[in-house]
Image (tube, rainbow, N blue to C red):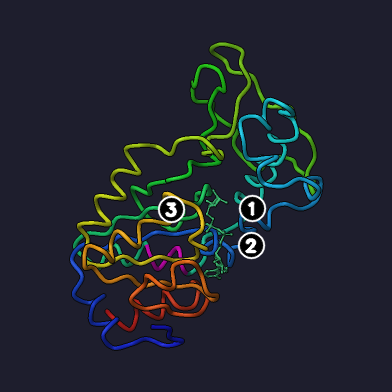
Amino acid sequence: MTFTCFDLRMIATLQGAQKIVVLTGAGISVESGIPTFRDAITGLWKNFDIEMLATAEAFLRDPALVWGWYEWRRMKVLSAQPNAAHIAIAELAGRVPQLSLFTQNVDDLHERAGSIDVRHLHGSLHHPRCFDCGHPYSLPDGVPDEPEGGRRLSPPKCLECGGMIRPGVVWFNEPLPVNILDGAFELSNSCDLLIVVGTSGVVYPVAQLPEVARNAGHKVIQINPARSELDRICTWNVRGSAGKLLPAMINRAF
Ligand code: APR
């Protein structure tokens, strides 16, 4: 069912939910000014496609191009603020017995909005590590000096082994963090409500989570201004932006 307002049964389900799973994608950060993953191919990188930037092979082929792209994206995040959707999810966690937040996003906006235990299924821009030995690398504080449009930046060197530092994100053809992914499947199966916000639902295995919840007999609410691959699975498809709909839905319920 597709709605542009709130169905009373949906609100009642939210009010009665004991175990909620929230799954977010790039769309929840759009109203903070963060380009979605596919919109971030601009400037210096506009002639590259995703697979030519977000892979280990791309990094080895041209470390400065890839590191520069991720540093530009990190700069965009550090210059941005969490929006009302991030804040609403943090507030919802205080109104229900259990809320587990999983995100495909590599920004830290959920954390800065007050959410705790944010589980990053695709890693994080803020936790780089050594490409060779895996040792974590501490990025300097502050916003990197990155002119709009970006430029090549040589990655720093590992303090342990001298290897190149790589972004702490999950690249294409890389495994997702097993413990986080297993937790997401387990909780999608055992929750009583899954709320999916701002994802096109095209990248697996994460895109499978709403179906796991639905197949286990649980309700699924989707918030997205556009149709997505998840429409056919969700109990309620609420059309609109997360920054407007999430706060309104939570205020309506509690
Ligand atoms: N509120 C809610 N949803 C929105 C908003 C908004 N204001 N603006 C856009 N959206 C929706 C779009 O309609 C789209 O369905 O957000 C979704 C963004 O989809 P993608 O750009 O494909 O991002 P995402 O689904 O998070 O991508 C998943 O794929 O590219 C890889 O690893 C990358 O984590 C990423 C994964």
Q: Where does the image place residue 54, in percent across and percent down from the top left?
A: 63, 40
**Which residue is at 20% across, 57% downward?**
190
- Residue 208 point in image, percent of width and height: 38, 56
* Amino acid type at mark 3: Thr
The numbered mark, 2 or 3, whose residue comes first in the sequence reads 2
The residue that mark 2 highlights is 33
Would you identify the image quadrant in which residue 16 lies?
Answer: bottom left
Q: Is residue 87 above or below residue 157?
A: below
Labelled pair 2, 1 in contact (Cβ < 8 Å): yes
Q: CA distance from mark 2 to mark 3?
A: 17 Å
Circle 2: residue type: Gly
Foreground label between 1 and 3: 3
What amino acid type should be assigned to the residue bearing mark 1? Ser
Q: Residue at x 30, y 60 (%)?
A: 21
Return the residue nearer the eye: 77 or 22.
22
Q: Point out the residue furthest to the top here.
A: 161
Q: CA distance from mark 2 to mark 1?
A: 9 Å
Report how many numbered discs are placed on residues in the image: 3
Residue occupying image coordinates x 44% and y 58%: 113
Residue placed most toward the observer, 1 or 68? 1
Mark closer to the chain start, 2 or 1: 2
**Residue under numbered circle 1:** 79
The N terminus sits in image quarter: bottom left
Q: Quadrant of ligand 1?
A: bottom right
In front: 159, or 169? 169
Mark 1 residue element: loop
Q: Secondary structure at mark 2?
A: loop
Residue at image point 54% right, 32% down: 128
189 within the magenta span: no
Instruction: Read off the magenta span.
Output: 85-89
Which residue does the numbered mark 3 point to in the structure image? 103
* Quadrant in the rendering for residue 156: top right
